[in-house]
Image (cartoon, rainbow, N blue to C red):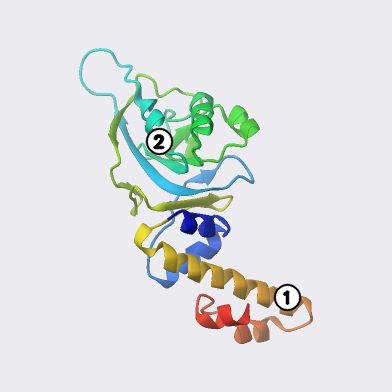
Amino acid sequence: MSDLVARLSALDTAAVSDALDSLGITGVLPGIAARVPGSRACGTAYTVTYGPVRGDGPKFRNAANYLDDVPEGSVVVVDNGGNTSCTNWGSLLTAVARARGVRGTVLHGSARDLAEIRAAGYPLFSTGITMVSGKNRVELSEVGATVDVHGTRVRPGDIVLADDSGVIVVPAEHAEEVAERAERVEATERRIAQAVAQGRRLDEARAEFGYATPWQDKAAASA
């Protein structure tokens, strides 16, 4: 899996999205945007589910203590149901994540302390931004469950790739084929760009290098 993570980390989300499209797989996490321009994250998903504080007694639940157990090389994926009224991540968790070797965080929810996180260069992707704390508002519901972001499932061990264009998830069982196809997509687009720069017509270059189906072997042979 580490080899596949390395291969996918060298690609952009657009090429990976095209590869997933060619296989009929939905991988995009809609509405989740990059919060640290220029940052990238790629690693295996570590899934966390939050929910509103329930029951009687103290409201503070230490919801983020799961972070001590996140394996190095993971991308944390937090599902708070898209709730943007309070945060699930901030500068303190960023410091812990960096110390643990976490590669990035994806929030179906909100973050705060954006200036500090940007200064740290930590890859953060979220639905929203707010200064309102999640303390006394949310609690940890589950770790290691499949989460659903607007119809896209994320399972522990799936590969998460994120860049300025957004966040995409590659099912673990399809990772090798997706990597191969995405590499062909990028090779095809490079060949077309080179041909046009040398004076070729765009329609001719697209036809020659297989722009309509850039993930096919024809693209790899042209690289």
Q: Mark 2 or mark 1: which is in front? A: 2
Which quadrant holds residue 70?
Answer: top left
**Front residue of 26 and 44:** 44
Residue, disc 1: 194
Q: Secondary structure at mark 1?
A: helix
Type of the residue with mark 1: Gln
- Taking the view exactly as shown, the residue that stands out farthest to the left is 55
Residue, disc 2: 70
Which quadrant holds residue 57?
Answer: top left
- Taking the view exactly as shown, the residue that stands out farthest to the top is 57
**Where does the N terminus fall, quadrant-wise?**
bottom left
**In the rendered view, would you say 150 is above or below 110?**
below
Residue at the spot 52% in from the left edge and 45% down from the top edge:
33
Residue 118, percent from left and from top: 62, 34
Residue 29, percent from left and from top: 43, 51
Q: First in sequence, mark 2 or 1: give its number.
A: 2
Residue 199, percent from left and from top: 79, 82
**Front residue of 190 and 150:** 190
Residue at the spot 41% in from the left edge and 38% down from the top edge:
71
Does any portion of residue 86 appear in the rendered image?
Answer: yes
- Left or right: where 144 falls relative to 205: left
Residue 207, percent from left and from top: 61, 86
